[in-house]
Image (cartoon, rainbow, N blue to C red):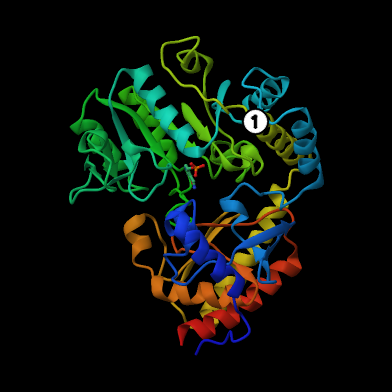
Amino acid sequence: ARSKPEYRLDRSHAEFVRAGKVIPGGVNSPARAFGAVGGEPPFLDRAEGAYLYDIDGHQYIDYIGSWGPMILGHCRPEVNAAVAEALAKSPSFGAPTVREAEIAEEVAAAVPSIEMVRFVSSGTEAAMSAVRLARGVTGRDKIIKMIGHYHGHVDALLVSAGSAVATLGHPNSPGVTPGAAADTILVPFNDASAVASAFERYPGQVAAVLLEPVAGNMGCVPPRPGYLERLRELTTKHGALLFFDEVMTGFRLSYGGAQEYFGVTPDVTCLGKIIGGGLPAAAYGASKEIMSRISPVGPIFQAGTLSGNPLAMAAGLTTLRLLKRENPYPALDRLAERLEDGLRRAATDARVPHCVQRVGSMITIFFAEGPIHDFDDAKRSDTALFGRFFWELLARGVYFPCSQFEAAFLSSAHTEADIDHTVQAAREALLAARG
Ligand code: PMP
């Protein structure tokens, strides 16, 4: 029995219908249309700290944080002030500015694998450019990718697995050519032997092993102990680059990202989300030697009209400096642990099969028995139950990611009271959702 008679989205509905006439699905990124949970999304008006406000007058505790960037919460005064100051000087020049070196120095000091970094405007662009870099540097074509990991809508990475493990991929969207997919080898996450056999099957052909060091795009799935270390050994042995996509984990799991958190240093890293402080910025970086192969120093081409955009650099640099100064990571971990424990107890009491997985402030409640190690495990989840749970939560003022296969994020603006409210809402939502 669903019990949310008072929760209505009349104005959002009207705007969704209007938008749907001029924007495919009414949205500029598909997940926002709530296809995975059914129904129509609330349209948002504003946000502050850990709270979102929609145009129908509802307030929500935010667990998506713009899908990762808002680790300090929304509208941190220092970040907004830095953006306003930059805006007054001009939104864009297309010429060098001082802040670009300042933020690059900050990133190089923070992220173990990075000595030099190039800024771009989206995680997709960062991943795409870094794949080109890996191929250009090694002179090899093939990329090993993990099934269920997402690196943006790059042709070569929008690929699904064939029936056998460690085989070449198939396009998983119309418009991606078989040629674009043909050099992508898919293996399951958390299975180092699959990577070893891929190296044996394609000797001397693999440019890089690419992965989310903690998967967030199939729900939160940590690496098994020793897995990242093993990938480090295998890539070194076979002359390939280890490539961490830290678009989600960078500045999230610790200031130096997953590579600092786990103590495994890749060759190439891409960053996004937090590095732009909520504005469009992303980056890829590596050693000086590798990065010196990029134009205009080297022959590998990459460029961008709005790359290093002043507003994005102001938001990003201010966010990074606040993170370094305030070191919110231990507190975020404690807060997320409180949520983890609360969700686990609520789901146990509701007798719902579940598995709560968390690394730092990334967390997912899977509606399946755990542990979840790879995409096949994740796909066993009861997504219909997740959809009902999601809506029951939303009606109770808690905004979780609108898919079983996305991680929730906490911010330093969340309080223990927010977590306790969320756990109580989850308790009620689980009882209502399980029927
Ligand atoms: N890599 C990872 C790990 C991501 O989570 C995402 C986006 N969720 C991307 C790349 C793509 O970033 P963007 O949406 O900014 O293109």
Left/right placement of residue 193 relative to residue 324 reads left
Q: Amino acid at mark 1?
A: Ala
Vertical side of 139 occupied by 406: above or below: below
Instruction: Give SS at disc 1.
Output: helix
Task: Quadrant for residue 382, please give it.
Answer: bottom left
Q: Is the residue marked by circle 1 packed among few (<14), some (14-19), or many (20+) residues within 10 Å?
A: many
Residue 390, position as x, y percentages in the image: 52, 72
Residue 41, position as x, y percentages in the image: 53, 66
Q: Residue at x 24, y 25 (%)?
A: 205
Left/right placement of residue 311 relative to residue 150 reads right
Of residue 98 and residue 373, the one placed in the foreground of this image is: 98
Circle 1 residue: 110
Mark count: 1
Left/right placement of residue 136 relative to residue 410 reads left
Vertical side of 32 occupied by 422: above or below: below
Q: Residue at x 45, y 52 (%)?
A: 217
Q: Is mark 1 within 8 Å of ligand 1?
A: no
Residue 302, position as x, y percentages in the image: 46, 21
Task: Quadrant for residue 399, please give it.
Answer: bottom right
Residue 93, position as x, y percentages in the image: 66, 22
Q: Can residue 121 be seen?
A: yes
Q: Can residue 356 be seen?
A: no
Vertical side of 68 occupied by 122: above or below: above
Q: Residue at x 56, y 87 (%)?
A: 3
